[in-house]
Every structure is written in structure tokens, then in C-alpha cells.
Image: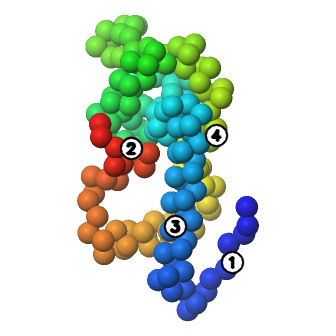
Amino acid sequence: MSQPSPVTPSAASPAQVLRRFRQVFGAVRSQFAQIEKRTGLGGAQLWALSLVQQRPGIGMGELARLMDVHQSTASNLVKGLVLRELLEAGKHGPDRRAVQLSLLPAGARLLRRAPGPAEGVLPQALQNLDAETLARLDGDLGRLIELLGADARAANIPLSESGRAT
């Protein structure tokens, strides 16, 4: 992977920034395509499956929190994984109202052949940024979002799910 060329604030142009967005979106789309081709799942479904593998017995609320999505979004992702017999959702333990999720053998086999990282290339890259860069990026993207008039509800929809029918 080639290193990005440094850009000074005076050298940045809208066209240059647009090209960088295309590179980011291209990398994300490429990984989603690889995931779907190798597993038949969307990126968010794979991430949910991997989180259940890491935390057997996790509840729906905790899964939603870890994925930074609304609980109904997590529930819809899990529903598809249960229907495909990759996860089991059961009410075990002392609180029979709470659903605990467990990975089924088919889910474990699917995760072994899935391309990584399970959480996605963008979340992983963001986690690898230093705090100063991440804070600056957050502020700059916040300003861009204002100019776009973007729908705030979109912030809690996984990229792999945006544009899909649920």
C-alpha cells in the first residue's frame, strides 16, 4: 500500500480531498465485497458474529453498544444470523427477559474463512490514529457534515448496511 503524499493546508484543493474520499470509500467497498464474496454476509453481520464469538452470552444491548448502532439495528442484524443458523439467541440465566447470543458451529466455520478485520478496515484504521489526528478529523468531518446537511440518523447505521433494504 503506498504512503499518502503529505498535503499542506495551502496545497489542499477540493479535488484532492475528493480523491482522498474516493480512496477511503473504495477501500471500504472493496473489503465489503470480499466479505460478501467469501461469506455471503454483509460487513456489519460479520462484525456482529465476531463480537459474539469474542463475548459468548453477550446481550443485544451490549452488542449494539460495541457496534455503536441502535439496538433495533443490532436486533435486525442478529435476526438474519439466527435465521442462517450462525447464531443462537436464547433466554438463559437468571434474567429470562434478556436474550444471550451464542455462536453456532456454522458461524465459527464462517468466521475462520472470513477476510479481516471483522470490524472493518475503516474502524480499524481510525483506532490506529493518534488522539490529536482523530480529534482534528472529527472536528473537520463535523463541519463537512454541517455543510452537507446530512441526516444525523445515518450516524448509527453501519456503512455496510446503508442503502440496503432491511
Observer-nearest of 4 and 32: 32
- In primary-sequence order, the first of circles 1 and 2 is 1
- Secondary element type, mark 1: loop
Residue occupied by mark 4: 116
Residue ID for mark 2: 161
Residue at disc 3, secondary structure:
helix
Compared with residue 161, is residue 130 higher up or lower down, i.e. above or below?
below
Give the side of residue 153 with respect to residue 27, left or right.
left
Mark toward the start of the polypeptide (4 vs 2): 4
Q: Specify whether residue 100 is in view.
A: no
Relative height, residue 30 to residue 110 (above, below): below
Residue at mark 1: 5
Query: Looking at the image, is mark 4 or mark 1 earlier in the sequence?
Result: 1
In the image, what residue occupies the spot 57% across and 65% down?
23
Mark 3 sits on what residue? 22
Rendered-image quadrant of the C terminus: top left
- The answer to which of marks 2 and 3 sits earlier in the sequence is 3
Measure the alpha-carbon separation of dots 3 and 4: 21 Å
Q: Mark 2 is on which residue type? A: Glu
How crowded pointer 1 is (Cα within 10 Å; few <14, some 14-19, many 20+) is rated as: few
